[in-house]
Image (cartoon, rainbow, N blue to C red):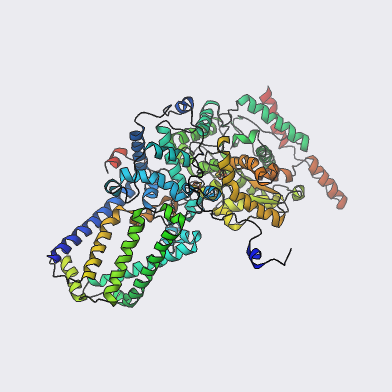
Amino acid sequence: MQTTIYAVLFYSAAAIFAGGLALRLWQYARTPVPLKVPTTPAPVTRAGAAFRVLREVTVFESLFKSSKWIWLFGWVFHVSLALVLLRHLRYFMEPVWPPVALLQPFGVYAGFAMVAALFALWVRRVAIARMRYISDAFDHLILLLLLALGATGLGMKFVEHTDIVLVKGFFLGLMSFEPSPLPSDPLLLAHLALAAVLMIVFPFSKLLHAPGVFFSPSRNQTDDPRERRYAPVAPDRTAVSKA
Amino acid sequence: MDRLTTEDSAERPLHPDPLECPSLAIGAMANSKPFPASAAHQTALGFPGELVENWQEKAIAKLGDLVRNNRALRFYLDGCVRCGACTDKCHYFLGTGDPNNMPVARQNLMRKVYRRHFTLSGRIAPSLVGAEDLTREVLDEWYTYFHQCSQCRRCSVYCPFGIDTAEISMAAREIMDHIGMGQKYCNEIIGKVFKVGNNLGLPPKALKATLASLEEEIEEDTGVPVRLPLDEEGADILLVTPSADFFASPHMEGLIGYAKVLHESGVSWTFSSHASEAANFGMFIGSHETMQKVAQRIADAARDLKVKRIVFGECGHAWRVAYNFLDTLAGPFDFLDRRYPVPQHICEFTHDLIRQGKLTLDKSKNDHIRLTFHDSCNVARASRMGDVPGGQFEIPRAILRASCNHYYDMDPDTIREATLCCGGGGGLLTDELMDLRIKGASPRMKALREVADEHGVTHMAAICAICKAQFSKVLPKFGFDMEAIVSVHQMVSNAIVLTGSKQDEEANEADEQAEPVPAVAVPAETAEPAQAANAQEEA
Ligand code: SF4
Ligand code: SF4
Ligand code: SF4
């Protein structure tokens, strides 16, 4: 029963995640940028602009300019999240790719770093008046959700082990459309439910900032309006409105 | 200095930190709003004269239209994670403490409506994601706080996603205009541009008289007949300047500077009475159509006067529109000489001449001035000069350093891309917003106070007409002289030694006494055709 519920949950979550994300990205791609609006000084070549976006994505350049504390917490969180996600790939493949296997030990440290950074981000959100003022309920909830996700994950690793072989079997089964039984440890079930919720809200919330940053005109445009005439194709208003 | 201070006071900085973050003062600026546009001012631009009956519906429809047609707006409304990186970056927040002046909070005023109507989460669970209907209260908040943003883009520099609150303010004003809730200052001025050709409503006749009296003034000063031509067909360059340059101070001193530099270059040039205004307030009100119409005048004037190049005078937002948008809005400009950038900034023009050694600048003429430079935000964060990124910072400074002996930069966190707005940009340069303007200027004023005390700085140069007007008004409120603000080309004007001028002859005489050299022939060529043209004009 519970295996079926989780199978259905993950199938729908994956569908909503992929479908929603594709829809949103398609929407961004279809929406024109009527004018040149890079925040200057900006790179004058396309390669330069791509490198600027890359710096934003990897080292959070602008955030670094703004405040070293937000940068530290934000960067540590995102890098550890990336490591943790990569580590989780092992539950979806057999045999495990050597690079993923190599990450295994770091992934565990990253788990701790992620939870610590999330906690710091949340304390910041609660303790600073400016942050309280700009936060809505969801901003708190999403942090708490991620914290809970991290905590349940670490819990399974260090406190209440679960049968990881069975879990892997469940996911490999899902991928071949032959679900196998899932262990019924409460920590695991909570962890998986939270993960599914995260996937479902991703395309419809601020979490969209992850892929969205590639579409930010102030960062991805080249500064070359005098060298190359900028004449975006006039939008097909009706087609876009229907989307 | 008194070294016997307690530890406590020793740690206290001598000057207040220009970027010091205030504590929140909720509602502090809730009563600051500009006068609404009258029905006549609204209809002149094609907007409804008063708040339309179904305003809510129309506003939402307009918002949807903007979001569907501008990826920047769409992503900026979606992408914010409330990280808070921008919260202490707006000069209006620093100056007022009103939390709605934190860039993200300002954005949230629109974001909450966008969410309610255009996102799944906002439709299903509005309270969870802070989504709200566009009520009358929300609309009033829009009017209040989207008119407390000078669209300076400082926040966008620090946002990890480059979210630019200016873009959102523009959209909000565009929506408000479309439901009949425009702002008087901007809309009245745009009306004048359409009717008369410039922001000040200065008719061609008055303009001509002004230019003639300036010519006289320069000739009296230098003995050289420097011309300020108007509507001269076939000139090489069309010079487009903010109309404040024609009569306000220190703008006019800057204009004299352009004229002297252009004279010295030997290139023929002209103003246009049809496009006697560089400013484009269409940007401030976020109206693509208006901005396009205003920009079109310049293209038309260039075509009519058969010029080869377009050069812009000192104006911040005008340069943004010119540099980034002109070609898109009113181009292509194939009829111009493509060996020169289209358009060019007067600073680029002057800088080139300095580099080629074609200008004689006597720095000592500015020895009574100890100077700093205010990077105008639209130039700094929304344009470029020269070939390399950051030229907009280096070129004006290079010109100033070539024109005076005493130059000092302000706190590095308050200049260049981090520059603080003057507090009067973005269509807020109106008397009823004076309180906001003074508070918004305070971070810049503190930075100026630092260099004034540390380096004895007496003057600050700017390359934006709005900055100059704003500073002349607010400087006295902070204990500075109102004439402490100068134009970049005013410094050039002071220092330049025109060929064949009184100053030139004095210098030559001094040279001759020092070491006899063959007398340099005064090149009459530059002056003569100009005089001929003058006679023709009068005939
Ligand atoms: S654009 Fe400038 S004035 Fe507007 S919110 Fe950002 S920092 Fe403030
Ligand atoms: S810096 Fe950008 S993402 Fe962060 S709160 Fe401000 S607008 Fe939002
Ligand atoms: S007036 Fe000057 S400083 Fe102020 S917004 Fe415009 S360019 Fe920026």
Front residue of B295 and A28: A28
Q: Residue at x 24, y 61 (%)?
A: A196
Numbered disc total:
0
Q: Residue at x 49, y 59 (%)?
A: A66
Give whichever of B389, A25 is nearer the camera.
A25
User: Is B422 left or right of A112, judged from the image as shown?
Assistant: right
A21 vs A69, left or right, is left
Q: Is residue B187 above or below residue A231?
A: above
Q: Please identify the quadrant where the N terminus of chain B is shown.
A: bottom right
Q: Is residue B182 left or right of residue B520?
A: left
Residue B341 location (% of width, % of height): 54, 45
Residue A138: x percent and y percent?
33, 55
In what quadrant of the picture does the C terminus of chain B appear?
A: top right
- B135, above or below B164, in the image: above
Residue located farthest toward the top when viewing the structure as drawn: B539
User: Of B55 and B363, which appears nearest the observer?
Assistant: B55
